[in-house]
Image (tube, helix red, strand yellow):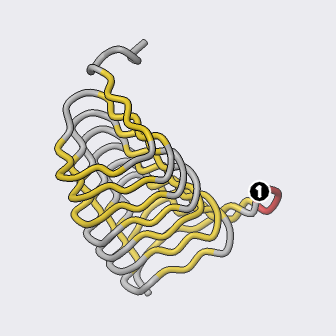
Amino acid sequence: MGEFKLRFHKPTHTYILTSGYLDRNVRVNGNLITGPGVRFWNDLVVRGELILGKGSSVGGQVFAKKAIICAYCKVVGGVQVEEQLQVHDGCVLTREVLCKGDVRIRPRVVIDSLKSNGTVVVEGKTDISNIEAKRLIEVPEGVFDV
């Protein structure tokens, strides 16, 4: 199963994985927050909201209701999200990304293909081979920085 440190926040039904790696498919019936550098060697399925910590990686596919993929994460398989998706600076998603809701992409993100039924906001310079969206908004880098 791998080595990991896991906590559970009962009021919000949120699992908090602070560090480690998991070498099997992972299914979470609730929300999941990971710390930085957590490694999933196979698929990750989250029935609630996923916050994938900075520099984490997933060797398989990611399925979630909502997802925030923090900076410098890597997902080798595809990503499927039912509602909203945020992909932060420097992430690499090597397969197709499917989202039924809105998507926000930060600078220096690499994505093979992105399909969304909602609005896609792309901030700054990215490397996305193909984008299909209901509405596409491109924003120059630095406009949202505070």
The amino acid pointed to by label 1 is: Thr
| Image vertical order of residue 97 relative to residue 103, above or below | below
The C terminus: image quadrant = top left
Q: Residue 83 occupies which quadrant of the picture?
A: bottom right
Residue in the picture at 41% in, 62% down: 98
**Residue 21: x %, y % from top left:** 38, 72
Q: Residue 77's spot in the image, x, y percent?
A: 29, 72
Of the pair 143 and 1, the residue shown nearer to us: 143
* Quadrant of the rendering where the N terminus is positioned: bottom left
Image point (57%, 56%), residue name: 66
Residue 79 occupies which quadrant of the picture? bottom left
Q: Nearer the viewer, residue 58 or 61?
A: 61
Front-lying residue, 86 or 38:
86
Q: Residue reaching furthest front?
A: 134
Q: Residue at x 17, y 52 (%)?
A: 129
Read off the residue under disc 1.
Answer: 12
Q: Is residue 104 above or below residue 69?
A: above
